[in-house]
Image: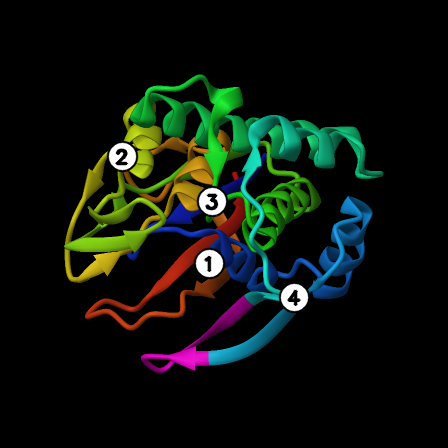
């Protein structure tokens, strides 16, 4: 049985998730080529093998080639995904991840999910992060997915609605609907984003600790910020 384990000691975001999958062996060329099936123009992936705190890992950035001001509804994003030529299983996974964000944002702002205006998450880079995570997940094709407790960070974050406490309200709402325990340690700022929380909530269940497994690959997906703790999502792929 193939096992995928998310070690969220420094939280999780969309770009950290892509970096970790690529560091575990998913092909960057395959990811870029498959993302082109979305038929969303104006972006490319910038993938770099680099080091943080002496640890080698992968940083994956979505580079938008033009400025993005679109505020999309969940229905708009769902249509982009469903009208693409992606495989059906990837479409279903990506839509479910976005639905988690829409439901959380809707509850926080007092509107129905279909009436949520996506700001940051509606931008091209976040669409690519979520669909890219679905592509990578199905490429690895695990039989079971688990996660550690989630470090959410501390302090405040600046977003479209102003300066808000960490975890951001949508992040807190997404995680509240799961059995994933959270904590805040060794990181001043936002460790876990709504995108990362939704990916984790859709794909993984809590294991309490690293599950019994034979480890085949360990990958590190780096975030852009510097914290007291290594800012990386660690991913294990193995079997039992």
Closer mark to the observer between disc 1 and disc 3: 3
Q: Earlier in the sequence, mark 1 or mark 3?
A: 1
Image x and y of residue 4, in percent: 51, 43
> Which percent across, then down, holds residue 124?
61, 52
From this view, report whether residue 39 is shown above or below residue 73: below
Question: Reading the chain from its start, which is encountered first: label 1 or label 4?
Answer: 1
Residue linked to disc 2: 172
Q: Which residue lies most toward the right here?
A: 85
Measure the alpha-carbon separation of dots 4 and 2: 31 Å
Q: Is residue 32 above or below residue 102?
A: below
Q: Which residue is mark 1?
A: 16
Give the residue at x 34% y 21%: 107
**Quarter of the image where one finds residue 44:** bottom right
Q: Nearer the viewer, residue 25 or 121?
A: 121
Q: Which residues are magenta?
A: 51-60
Distance CA(mark 1)–CA(mark 3): 20 Å
Find residue 66 and name its label. 4
């Amino acid at each position: 049985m193939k096992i995928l384990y998310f070690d969220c000691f420094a939280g999780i975001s969309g770009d950290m998730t892509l970096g970790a999958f690529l560091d575990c062996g998913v092909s960057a060329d395959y990811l870029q080529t498959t993302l082109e099936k979305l038929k969303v123009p104006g972006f490319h992936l910038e993938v770099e093998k680099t080091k943080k705190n002496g640890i080698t890992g992968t940083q994956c950035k979505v580079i938008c080639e033009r400025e993005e001001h679109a505020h999309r509804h969940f229905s708009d994003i769902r249509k982009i995904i469903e009208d693409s030529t992606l495989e059906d299983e990837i479409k279903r996974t990506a839509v479910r991840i976005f639905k988690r964000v829409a439901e959380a944002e809707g509850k926080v702002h007092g509107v129905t999910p279909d009436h949520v205006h996506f700001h940051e998450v509606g931008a091209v880079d976040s669409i690519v992060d979520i669909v890219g995570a679905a592509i990578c997940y199905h490429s690895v094709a695990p039989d079971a997915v688990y996660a550690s407790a989630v470090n959410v960070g501390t302090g405040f974050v600046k977003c479209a609605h102003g300066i808000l406490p960490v975890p951001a309200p949508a992040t807190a709402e997404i995680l509240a609907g799961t059995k994933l325990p959270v904590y805040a340690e060794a990181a001043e700022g936002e460790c876990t984003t709504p995108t990362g929380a939704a990916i984790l909530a859709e794909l993984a269940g809590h294991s309490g600790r690293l599950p019994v497994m034979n480890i085949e690959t360990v990958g590190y997906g780096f975030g852009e910020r510097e914290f007291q703790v290594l800012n990386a999502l660690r991913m294990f792929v193995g079997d039992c």
